[in-house]
Image: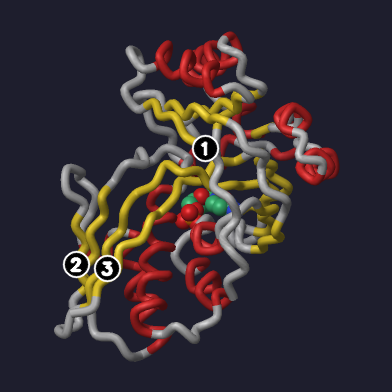
Amino acid sequence: MKALTLNAPAKLNLTLDILRRRADGYHDLEMVMFSVDLCDRVTVRLREDGNILVRAPGTDLPAGEDNLAGKAARAFFNETGSTPGADITLEKRIPAQAGMGGGSSDAAAVLRALRALTAPALPLRRLEELGAQIGSDVPYCVHGGTVLAQGRGERLTDWPDVPPCAIVVCKPDFGLSTPALFGRVRVDALGPRPDHGAMLRALRAGDLSAAAAQAVNVFEEVLTPKEGETIHAIRRQMLACGALAARMTGSGPTVFGLFRQAEDAARAFKALCPRFSQTFLTRPLAAPAGEV
Ligand code: C5P
């Protein structure tokens, strides 16, 4: 049976702004996202019996269609009306429930693998639309690169890549619920907002320091004192080691630091590892070659 293994990269939010609550319960967002080389590995093997099975060894992630990866396979088969089933294996490295889009990226890798195996003519744009049925971050994970994402997260504009740098990613031991965090937001009361004009100028100029100075995530405004204590302690540690910026990604709780010097990133990694076992050194991924 035909099979394919793909990388499913983690995403980070260079910015995250919340513009308004919508009538459908979602929020209109504006965020700059990019992918890093911290990846899950996703293997998709076609079956003949119509079943969709998902395994993620060493995790307690749901099997079958309760998993975003299984949902993605079902959405793909409904769209193409052709292929009968899939065995999906997820080798997880991206922390779950971390604001790094791990589940969304696995789902996007399933869509890309099924397209390559069964329907190579299906436009990438259609794959992104299928992704939007599965989760707000899935279209971005199908698309990749550095983008400005708007709407629910599904309207994507290619932006210049984040300049090469070293990145430390650190996930605290607690989780944050995305719907609960959105529920705390009073849009009119949010503090400093990202300046996307200034961010675009910084990225166009390839100016890492200027881009770092514009990194803002409004979710940091709605943390409880207890959540904020850990998250700001991680940020302070990264900044003390020379990070140009240290911010929470997505709806957290993971914090990432951008470093010009790999040695500074290595020092931050060493300092954070003993307390936070889910700490990683990573780098931005270049935009994928112009696929359609
Ligand atoms: O789309 P997804 O299932 O990933 O979203 C999870 C939850 O996050 C939604 O149920 C909603 O509460 C919140 N959300 C939102 N606005 C967005 C994306 C997510 O309010 N743009």
Q: Which residue is mark 3?
A: 44
Mark 3–mark 1 contact, CB under 8 Å? no
Label 1 sits on residue = 283
Q: Quadrant of residue 197?
A: top right
Residue 36 relative to residue 67: left or right: right
Mark 2 element type: strand
Q: Nearer the viewer, residue 154 or 168?
A: 168
Classify 62 as above or below 97: below
Q: Residue at x 62, y 58 (%)?
A: 152
- Where residue 177 appears, as percent x and y from the top left, is 43, 39
Percent x, y of residue 175: 39, 32
Please tell me how many numbered marks the rendered image carries: 3
Q: Which residue is mark 2?
A: 53
Q: Amino acid at mark 1?
A: Arg
Q: Quadrant of the N terminus?
A: bottom left
Residue drawn at (40%, 48%) of the image? 102
Residue situated in front as seen by the camera: 46 or 247: 46
Indicate the secondary structure of the residue bearing disc 3: strand
Disc 2 versus disc 1: nearer the observer: 1
Is 10 in front, or is 25? 10
The kind of secondary structure element at disc 1 is loop
Looking at the image, is mark 3 or mark 2 nearer the viewer? 3
Which is in the foreground here, disc 3 or disc 1?
1
Cα gap from disc 2 to disc 1, whole angstroms: 32 Å
Q: Is mark 2 within 8 Å of ligand 1?
A: no
Q: Position of residue 116 (x, y in %)?
A: 40, 77
Lower sequence index among marks 2 and 1 = 2
